[in-house]
Image: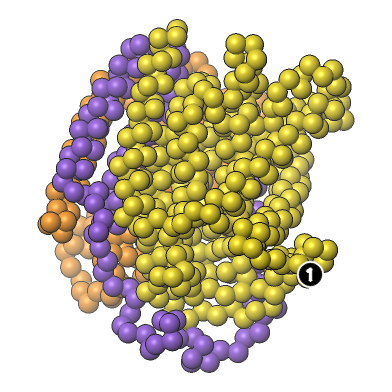
Chain colours: A purple, B orange, C yellow
Amino acid sequence: MLESYVPIFVMIAGGVIFGVVMVKLNEWFGPHRPNDEKLSTYESGMEPIRSARERFSVKFYMVAMLFILFDIEVVFLYPWAVSFKQLGLGGFVTMAVFIFVLFLGYFYVWRKGALEWD
Amino acid sequence: MDSHAVATGALYGYRNQKSSSTNNFFESSVTLETFLFYTLGAVSVGSALMMVTRRSPVMSALYLILNFFALGGLYLSLHAQFIAFIQILVYAGAIMVLFVFVIMLLNLGDEKKLNERFSWKKIVGAGLSFGVLMELIFVFAFSKANLPPSHFEKATDIGTVENIGMQLFTTFLFPFEVTSVLLLAAIVGAVVLAKKKLN
Amino acid sequence: MGSLLLISVIKFVAYVSIVLVTVIMLVYAERRVSAFIQNRLGPNRVGPWGLFQALVDVVKLLLKEDIVPKNAYKPVHDLAPIISIAVALSTFAVIPFGNTIELFGTQVKLMIADVNVGILYLLSITSLGVYGVTLAGWSSNNKYSLLGGLRSSAQLISYELSMGLSIIGVLMVCGTLRLDQIVLHQTTYLWGWLPAWNIFLQPVAFFTFFIAAFAETNRLPFDLPEAEPELVGGYHTEYTGLKFGLFFLAEYANMFTAGAVITTLFLGGWHLPYAEYLGLSPTMLSILQVLTFCVKLVLVELFFIVVRWTIPRFRYDQLMNIGWKVMLPLTLANVLVTGAVMLLIQ
């Protein structure tokens, strides 16, 4: 079993090496003539006002949070879908109940306006 | 059967497999399993140390992602394919996204050097870590004979997605359904936490 | 294991060369098709019909200065494009681009890695792609970059859900996570004449997966992360040289993989209907099937390109509404309806 994963390890390692080599190549071949104007933050030609790293909308945090919760639901669906034909009606009812409970949560999120963007 | 037994079973399976594996790594006697185990083990320990010692929270988060990745590889070497990829999908791909978002959201700067030189917290912390270390050493070095026997003939079959599906939706049906309530509570909790800002 | 490692490395090098050539062709195709749609000529000077334009662009990027703004966080600024490209290059590993072929007396499966949880691998690696974008946006310390990176991250994770849920329907029909088995499942015929491709068995899943694929590859109508009129260059505003090139390459490599996944999951992969009845030798049939896969892939990519240049961009609230209020319930309903129908048929 493990042998079949060797190409995958090689692909991931190779991808990282490819990226590193490209970045290094650019550093070797490209010129290096920095000056203050060139290294300043681009803000459509204006002097940059304050740092960019300021607090931003809590909405993004909400999305990440909801994503984790629904992602876990999807994770449970994979083994279920693969064994669906063996599990039969019992398996279907089980998952229908599970999805229904989570749908209640989804409905709550919707009604509370957490999915609204303005 | 708890997760401990599964891990043990996988461990036994891993041992049995080792003797039957004939692939040689560059004509030496190192098997693929041991090679992966030591490489990934080194990566996970190294990345964990880096994660704890970094000043910048973003770098810490990145090393934690690398750590989860190596952990996924270790699960794979124990023939737990489903858990291996779920580890990466859920921990590295979902939970750490939230971590990075929160670090960016709060705009955490580099950790400031703490002024306290000596405090009781350090002593208690060191004592507790030492206790845990001793416990781990004891468990792995002396109590091997007390580990529960594996429930599976072939440990390589436990980790397949088909097997997990059949077990999860028959034997472990009730814990599975309760999980939905847990997730529901978490969804409501997330909305309540952010509600003040939303209104 | 030494030989195994060697074969894997050869496979990787061959694959990367193919991807690089394909990306160059894709960029060329995109520029020519967009020029055709906008009644322009497009690149036509470098090489015959301008074919070498993208190649020369790579050399140009190589010779450009790598500028890291002084307020940027350099380690992460360097790391972000590497994450993007590593993710984009490694996802293709599990796609079968042909049936088995006989080489040196043994049957070889035409895929890079024949693993038993192919789809999970695909999804778990794809889910890491979000870091490239987020970290690029954050490390640049530029307001446009940060906004672009954030928007993009939220978009990627939102549509990742619909993507995962769309696949569930296919998994229920095929009953396996192996991509080669999923293709084999599609080589049968319904009622004796209709190829059992998942596009016919799972039309809703196909539709939602296709939309999610547009969003996951950051292409119009979902290219909010780099909406030029509002965000300059989005998350890669502060990138120059090959580091910018890597993001560019990753984007097209992702598009290439997305097309391959769509072909494999829904369009029958390498299956050419009725080719079994032509009476070809096994080797000829295998070659014909690889060509079929390539043709299907090219058609999907052309569709991607045409959509990009003909449909306007969504607004951000519309994008998130589609993701959470339309796609999510739709894909969930598809799972339940598929289950009910399958039980009724049984």
Residue A64 seen anywhere in this rendered image of the structure: no
Instruction: Name the residue carrying label 1.
Output: C46
Residues C71 and B78: in front is C71
Q: Which residue is drawn at 36% across and 70% down?
A: B55
Q: Quadrant of residue C263?
A: top right
In the rendered image, residue C50, in percent from the top left (x then y), is placed at: 77, 65
In the rendered image, residue C283, in percent from the top left (x then y), is placed at: 84, 27
* Category of crowding for the residue at label 1, using alpha-carbon neighbours closer than 10 angstroms: few (below 14), some (14–19), many (at least 20): few
B174 sits left or right of C95 in the view = left
Q: Which residue is drawn at 61% across and 55% down?
A: C252
C27 sits left or right of B196 in the view = right
In the rendered image, residue C289, in percent from the top left (x then y), is placed at: 75, 30
Q: Residue at x 43, y 82 (%)?
A: A44
Q: Which chain carries label 1?
A: C
Q: Which residue is drawn at 70% across and 66% down?
A: C41
In the rendered image, residue A115, in percent from the top left (x then y), is placed at: 25, 48
Identify the amino acid type marked 1: Val
Residues A115 and C315: in front is C315
Residue B136, above or below B57: above
B10 sits left or right of B103 in the view = right
